[in-house]
Amino acid sequence: MEHTLRTPLSKADIIKPRAGDIVYLDGIILTARDTAHERLLSSEKIPFDLSGAAIFHCGPLMRKNKKWTPIAVGPTTSARMSKMTPELLEKYGIRAIIGKGGMNGVVDALYEKCIYLAYPGGCAAIATDQIKRVKEVHWLDLGMPEAVWVFEVKQFGPLIVGIDAHGNDLYAEVEKRANEQIKSL
């Protein structure tokens, strides 16, 4: 099935898509990688709202003339952020995580709270066409790839629901099937 969701996302929005479905996002997405996650977890107050947000595990390449322009906006490996994800979801109410390669040990933390959306690797230049504008940048002191970029997007995707809000994990299913095939050899 195919879904178009608009941020900020509600619980009802993230309950509909199932693992394997295609999602497109409209609205605002925010980038966050390792160092931004660490700062989010250690901060009492942040300069942006994450309630119902979609976080993109991405270190974009940006250019600044009079305004910031994205050059390449591709996903980074999400597994690095897995151990920080449960606390981040509890603290901020994030509803979607976009990234690459799945996340280990987060199925219970995502249950009825959040979905994990896989963005196809190798499409960093194409993603720039789906970014309508760079709304803001925060924590640029962390460096360009680690800063939190706030993008306004239209039809951002296609994103594949890798882990849904019902406990289904495409990555775990693929691994299970692969192990079964190896055992049968």
Image: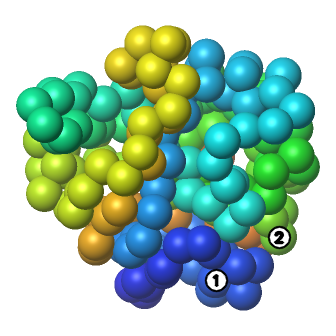
Drawn side of residue 119 relative to residue 47, left or right: left
What crowding class fits label 2: few (fewer than 14 Cα within 10 Å), some (14-19), or many (20 or more)? some
Q: Residue at x 84, y 22 (%)?
A: 42
Where 115 falls versus 14 (above or below)?
Answer: above
Q: Position of residue 38 (x, y in %)?
A: 72, 20
Between disc 1 and disc 2, the foreground one is 1
The quadrant where residue 121 appears: top left
Figure colour scheme: rainbow
Drawn side of residue 114 relative to residue 75, left or right: right
Where 142 falls versus 174 (above or below)?
Answer: above
Q: Position of residue 88 (x, y in %)?
A: 80, 40
Q: In this view of the protein, which residue sits in the foreground, 55 or 76?
A: 55
Where 19 falls versus 76 (above or below)?
Answer: below
Drawn side of residue 31 relative to residue 155, left or right: right
The quadrant where residue 143 appears: top left
Q: Earlier in the sequence, mark 1 or mark 2?
A: 1
Do tag 1 and tag 2 residues touch (Cβ < 8 Å)?
no
Q: Residue at x 19, y 40 (%)?
A: 67
Q: Residue at x 41, y 83 (%)?
A: 4
Q: Position of residue 57 (x, y in %)?
A: 49, 36
Residue bearing the label numbered 1: 13
Q: Residue at x 51, y 32 (%)?
A: 138
Q: Position of residue 70 (x, y in %)?
A: 19, 39
What crowding class fits label 1: few (fewer than 14 Cα within 10 Å), some (14-19), or many (20 or more)? some
Tell me the amino acid under the disc marked 1. Answer: Asp
Picture disc at residue 112: 2
Separation of residues labelled 1 and 2 (CA atoms): 11 Å
